[in-house]
Image (spheres, grey):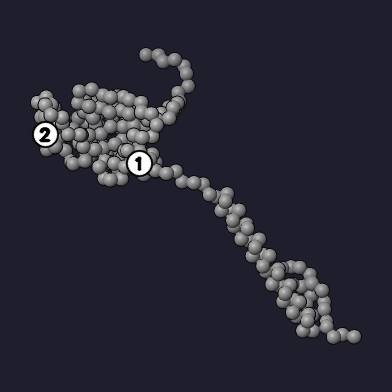
Amino acid sequence: MNFPRTAPAQTAPDWTVAFCDPPPLPPGAPWRNRLLHRLLTVLLRPGFRHCYALRPLHLAEGWLLFNPHSACTDILELRGQGFAAHLAAEAAAGRCRLVRAAARRPEAWAPRFSATCVSAVAHLIGAPSRPWTTPFALYRRLKQEETAMGSIFSTPSVDTSAADRQAELARQEAAETKAKTEAKLRALRAGQSGRSLLSYSGTGEQGVKTTLGAG
């Protein structure tokens, strides 16, 4: 399929992949849903029984949510930062795990052979997976790749290098001014005691030869 020749907002966006447990089933859920929920509870590690992905919107304020379920996939645009703040609070409370992942485009065909949340998220970001790959296995793989990226929810560090340089220059100027003042005071005291000084020590400034009491 040929797509229009328009510049994309970003060719390889960074996604945040969330790992958690699925919510409790509502009363009267179909038996297939109850069976799947039971299998997930028995076979998978607690806290790693479901995964989904999200990233900031490029052309608006908000987030794009990619949430694959057992029956369908939700792709939603979320306005504002409310969902991201809620998710960050859940992660801080230990109820989910967040990993930042860069989308990539594999050179070779990557057959998934399954329609699980893991295979859907892995296919979304181009990460390797197998039909038996668990959410925890995908988490460990993405966590190893996240080292140099940092969390998308972390507070960005402020660049203070310019202010630090200005502060250092101010400290140097203050130290030089103090040294010159002290040198002049020493010269003045030496002159009053009848000794002669031709320069202020440590400053490079020339002084006045003074001898008190000379006729």
What residue appears at the point 61 percent right and 53 percent down from the top-left corner?
Answer: 166
Residue 38 is labelled as 2
The one nearer the camera, 62 or 213, is: 62
Answer whether labels 1 and 2 touch (C-beta < 8 Å): no
Label 2: which secondary element: helix
Q: Nearer the viewer, mark 1 or mark 2?
A: 2
Mark 1 or mark 2: name the one nearer the start of the chain: 2
Residue at the limit of the structure toward the front, as seen here = 27
The kind of residue tagged 1 is: Glu
CA–CA distance between discs 1 and 2? 32 Å
Q: Give the quarter of the figure containing the N terminus.
A: top left
**Residue 64 makes an appearance in the image:** no
In this picture, residue 116 sits left or right of residue 142? left
Q: Which quarter of the figure has residue 102?
A: top left
- The amino acid pointed to by label 2 is Arg
How crowded pointer 1 is (Cα within 10 Å; few <14, some 14-19, many 20+) is rated as some
Disc 2 packing (10 Å; few <14; some 14–19; many ≥20) = few
User: Horizontal placement of 76 versus 157: left or right?
Assistant: left
The residue drawn where x is 13% and y is 26% is 29
- Secondary element under disc 1, as helix, strand or loop, is loop
Q: Is residue 79 left or right of residue 38?
A: right
Q: Is residue 139 left or right of residue 179?
A: left
Q: Which mark is residue 146?
A: 1
